[in-house]
Amino acid sequence: MKPIILASRSPRRQELLLGLGWKFTIADPGIDEQNGAGEAPRQLCRRLALEKAKAVSVKFPESIVIGADTIVVLEGKVLGKPANLQESSEMIKALSGKKHEVMTGVAVCLGEHCAVELETTRVFFRTLDLAEIESYVATGEGLDKAGAYAIQGKGALLVSGIEGCYFNVVGLPLPRLSFMLEGFGLTLSSQWGEDE
């Protein structure tokens, strides 16, 4: 089986792949995650995922490289990672009682051959009072996460429900990734390590 490289510094993505028992290495793609002028959210996360995968694939052309980029979209506006607790509070207030979308662009590259897809999950937040918002923000859990919350952590208590892939909200839609890898010759059994 060809080596797998995760082009991401995200500990959440690493944990998800480790949970599957996959063997992989990590490489920092080192790209600038900036919005292009007038770029739609769907285009943004697909482009960034592909740029991350390509940046690493150029250095390791014999490896299967996985790149991903996750964004939170509320009423057409992209919510990135908050710069501080104040921004974190503002984001959670904006999400309170509303539906938003979590989009992850996923790219897989082997040499010059690349595939990129998009996964979207709808997330519904409870209506939160100010004390609940301040209490969550004070944990600092959401500071390094798009939308300022972590559904796999304490942020689970902010959410009333989801429509779609849970793993996508964490940062990597595993079923879609597995399907994409089949296009690169990695069957489900080989991903589980049953094939040589």
Image: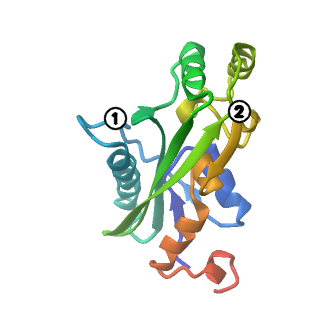
**Nearer-N-terminus badge (2/1):** 1
As drawn, the label of residue 34 is 1
Which is in the foreground here, disc 2 or disc 1?
A: 2
Q: Up-down: is 180 above or below 81?
A: below
As drawn, the label of residue 158 is 2
Q: Is residue 180 left or right of residue 192?
A: left
**Amino acid at the residue labelled 1:** Gln
Q: Up-down: is 81 above or below 168?
A: above
As drawn, the label of residue 159 is none
Q: Nearer the viewer, residue 193 or 95?
A: 95
Quadrant of the snapshot with the C terminus: bottom right
Q: Up-down: is 98 above or below 61?
A: above
Q: How many marks?
A: 2
Q: Position of residue 15 (x, y in %)?
A: 68, 52
x 55%, y 51%: residue: 121
x 32%, y 35%: residue: 35
Q: Position of residue 190 (x, y in %)?
A: 62, 81
**Amino acid at the residue labelled 2:** Leu
Q: Position of residue 173 (x, y in %)?
A: 57, 58
Q: Nearer the viewer, residue 24 or 139?
A: 139
**Tag 1's secondary structure?**
loop
Give the image's coloring scheme. Answer: rainbow
**Distance (Cα) linking label 2 and label 1:** 28 Å
Q: Residue furthest bottom?
A: 195
- Mark 1 residue crowding within 10 angstroms, few (<14) / some (14–19) / many (20+): few
Q: Is residue 173 left or right of residue 136?
A: left
Q: Is residue 93 left or right of residue 105?
A: right
Q: Nearer the viewer, residue 97 or 139?
A: 97
Quadrant of the snapshot with the N terminus: bottom right
